[in-house]
Image (spheres, rainbow, N blue to C red):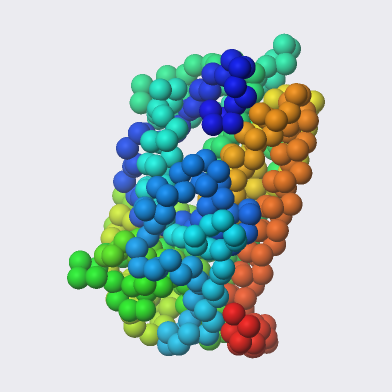
Amino acid sequence: MRKLWPSGLPPPRILMYEREPRVTPEGRDGYSISLAGYDETGGLFAARDMGILDQVLQRATPGLDGDFKLTLWDSTWKELLVQKYKPVDGLPTAGIRIARRELRNLLIEVAGTNDVTWGASCVGAKKLANGKIMVDVVNHSNSKERSQVECDLLVVADGASSKIRDMVRPEDPLQYTGIMMKGGLAVFPDGLPKPVDKNWGILLSKGQGVACFFSPYNEKSMAWGVSYRSESIEAPVNYSNPRDVQSVLDDCLELGKDFAEPFGSIIKATKPQEVSRLPAKDKQPFRHNISVTGPILFIGDSNHAVSPYAGYGASLAMKDGWDLSSKICEALELGDAVAAYDTVSVPRATKVIKESHSRIGMGHATGLSYYLAKTKITIGSYFV
């Protein structure tokens, strides 16, 4: 907004409420995310437009040598498919992986922190008679003190489990994809084992419906996640119970018992405080109706949550932020800006979610579906 605001007009006051503290909490810095540059919907395009592309590239996960590609391995680590991407004109790379903490810190630096209230959650929003929005705020750093703030426009970016969305759109919850995920952060003081030292991708089982995603975090640590089909949703990890934490690692070893080394070594090198157990959920995007809800706009996962199998959540969020700012600064009326924003954001997210469902089906295929998926992967390997 600061970059795009028309000169000669008094700028708006932008207040930001961030539920996390200024310093990244323990347990939230142990994974990397993807920023795409192989089409114009990617996060690297947003970084370029914001003028921070060079800083983003400098903080990218090392080891990929500027060659953005996704690798599919069989259970013996034989390469089934190496999907290479080409950058769109104007970008130096088709994509990167970057530690969440690094991207977050960079965005904090460039945005400035004068109008950020850290450790504060927006837990409610109500349309007022004057057309404005009253926002309920809980300050976690001050004994959960509650307050209210009146605003002309509320932009909601509180993630997949958005409290504001639940309140404004109770009929639009997250949908379970049928896939459970258990993962963690593995640390190797002497360096990552091959082939995951310089590659990120997915290890596939032989028709058991189990897959494992791997991504280097830095030269000595890597994020991983075992996923499998499950009709029921398991509870999150109880970190106060060492047995429950260990059960995640034990379950992953059993699920991946047919995976060759270094799979077992990666699981055993995982930090107990970094393990996770959660369902893969997503949600279709929606168009806004501010005549009903008032000036409340949802961006990123709060609008269109994607599962980790999309690999595009951060790109969508960054593009949403840039596109919404662009449309607001270009339009004379808020309604026109919202309609223009929905026109670009909804199809983009719809396409990503459709593609992620295809990956889930291919990565967790069993029976005849497994052999069809393997044939498709094999054929695809000749055209990349």
Q: Residue 371 lies in what quarter of the image?
A: bottom right
Query: Which residue: 59% across, 49% down?
Result: 316
Q: Nearer the viewer, residue 353 or 255?
A: 353
Query: Which residue: 35% across, 34% down?
Result: 22
Query: Which residue: 59% across, 60% down?
Result: 89
Q: Residue 169 lies in what quarter of the image?
A: top right
Res 214 seen here: no
Query: Which residue: 54% across, 82% down?
Result: 81
Q: Residue 152 lies in what quarter of the image?
A: top right
**Most extreme residue toward the top, as rendered?**
130
Res 87 seen here: yes
> How far across and how far down the image is residue 331, in percent?
73, 28
Q: Nearer the viewer, residue 194 or 122?
A: 194
> How far across and how far down the image is residue 295, in percent?
70, 25
> How far across and how far down the image is residue 311, in percent?
54, 60
Q: Quadrant of the C terminus?
A: bottom right
Q: Quadrant of the N terminus?
A: top right
Total marks shown come to 0
Q: Against 18, is 372 above or below? A: below
> How far across and how far down the image is residue 308, in percent?
53, 59
Asked whether, in this view, residue 261 is left or right of residue 345, the answer is left
